[in-house]
Amino acid sequence: MIQLHCRWKNPRHPAPKKSDLRRFADAAAKYAGLPLQPEWDLNLLFVGDISMARYNMELLGHEGTTDVITFSYFDDTDNWEENDTMIELIINPDAAEREGASRPGGYAAEMALYLVHGLLHSAGEDDLSPVPRKRMRRREKECLEALAKEFDFNKIFA
């Protein structure tokens, strides 16, 4: 099981219940193919467009806002100890609201996608070129379908 640390800094959207989010993140990590033992920490930060654009520029040198930024430390597993922070995700609910308006499942499905997308990056998936992007989209679909059997995304991300 993973340990979840969550900060919700987006007043435009309600924060999910931490217990629901923890169970969802734990299952999503399993479906993404991430190791669940020894126990490790997942840090989630939820921000709005303005903060996301700032993080995107400061941390990655990219201009503008984005949906999710992923930092994974699984590359250095030789020095990995139980309860180390292994993944940090910065997620933008404002982007999920915009994108979800035109997609099946709406905002909640889009938020689930962003979390899965970040975890898949941490599991080694890439989406920067066509062939890996196609694999990433297939893996996202597989993970989300499996998660939808266990969770109501609308109850987690109201």
Image (tube, helix red, strand yellow):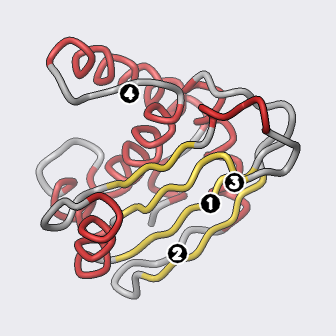
Disc number placed over residue 15 in the picture, else none: 2
The residue type indicated by label 1 comes to Asn
Q: Between label 4 and label 1, give the one nearer the viewer.
A: 1
Residue 53, image quadrant: bottom left
| Residue 131 horizontal/vertical position (percent) | 20, 11
Determine whether label 1 and label 2 are within 8 Å by CB: no
Q: Earlier in the sequence, mark 3 or mark 2?
A: 2
Relative placement, left or right, of 98 versus 29 is left
Q: Residue at x 11, y 50 (%)?
A: 102
Relative placement, left or right, of 39 versus 21 is right
Q: Between label 1 and label 2, give the one nearer the viewer.
A: 1
Q: Disc 3 on helix, strand or loop? A: helix
Label 1 Cα neighbours within 10 Å, binned few <14 / some 14-19 / many ≥20: some
Relative placement, left or right, of 46 versus 85 is left
Label 2 Cα neighbours within 10 Å, binned few <14 / some 14-19 / many ≥20: some
Q: Between label 4 and label 2, give the one nearer the viewer.
A: 4
Q: Which residue is mark 4?
A: 140
